[in-house]
């Protein structure tokens, strides 16, 4: 064996995840425990915030629409990148808020829009059609207050986005 054939030595560090230990324990070591009182408090906070859901979603949808309108006017690549990042963040905020309060359909659309924006260069007119389709169905889902998967109406909205993606992607 020559000097070039020496095996590379790799050292692996297993860091302790303190948050994981506190939240749910470490597999095989501790069970972790959530305080029932803490869980009740968290549930109460979420319940109290549920009344704010419509206002928060509406605010973020407006910001998303405003940024989308602005993005369509930007020529500078760096500025366009910032705008796309903001739209991605807004769609993730919508996804998270909707998911927290049981609006699965809206959550799915927020996630889908974010993924699409991040995977696409947003350089062709077809890309704009798909983004607009996402925004439109999110607006409809919000205005019709479609909870969970939205039932039949929700499936129709999902089909609309799916068709736009198939046709223009």
Image (cartoon, grey):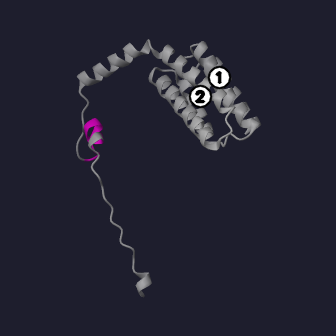
Residue 34: percent from left, percent from top: 26, 30
Location of mark 2 (residue): 109
Residue 131: percent from left, percent from top: 67, 31
Q: Is residue 16 magenta?
A: no
Q: Quadrant of the C terminus?
A: top right
Left or right, 131 with respect to 25, comes to right
Instruction: Give the residues drawn in magenta, as a range.
Output: 20-28
Residue 87: percent from left, percent from top: 57, 32
* Residue 149 in view, yes or no: no
Q: Earlier in the sequence, mark 1 or mark 2?
A: 2
Q: Quadrant of the N terminus?
A: bottom left
* Residue 99 in view, yes or no: yes
Left or right, 7 with respect to 33, comes to right
Instruction: Name the secondary structure under disc 2.
Output: helix
Location of mark 1 (residue): 137
Res 67 → quadrant: top right
């Amino acid at each position: 064996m020559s000097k070039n054939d020496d095996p590379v030595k790799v050292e692996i560090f297993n860091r302790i995840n303190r948050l994981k230990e506190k939240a749910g324990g470490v597999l095989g070591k501790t069970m972790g425990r959530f305080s029932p009182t803490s869980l009740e408090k968290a549930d109460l906070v979420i319940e109290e915030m549920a009344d704010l859901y419509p206002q928060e979603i509406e605010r973020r949808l407006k910001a998303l629409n405003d940024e989308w309108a602005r993005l369509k006017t930007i020529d500078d690549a760096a500025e366009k990148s910032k705008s796309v990042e903001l739209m991605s963040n807004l769609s993730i905020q919508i996804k998270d808020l909707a998911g927290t309060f049981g609006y699965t359909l809206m959550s799915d659309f927020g996630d889908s829009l974010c993924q699409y924006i991040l995977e696409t260069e947003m350089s062709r007119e077809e890309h704009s059609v798909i983004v607009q389709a996402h925004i439109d169905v999110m607006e409809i889902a919000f205005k019709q207050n479609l909870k969970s998967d939205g039932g039949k109406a929700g499936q129709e909205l999902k089909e609309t986005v799916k068709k736009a993606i198939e046709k223009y992607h």
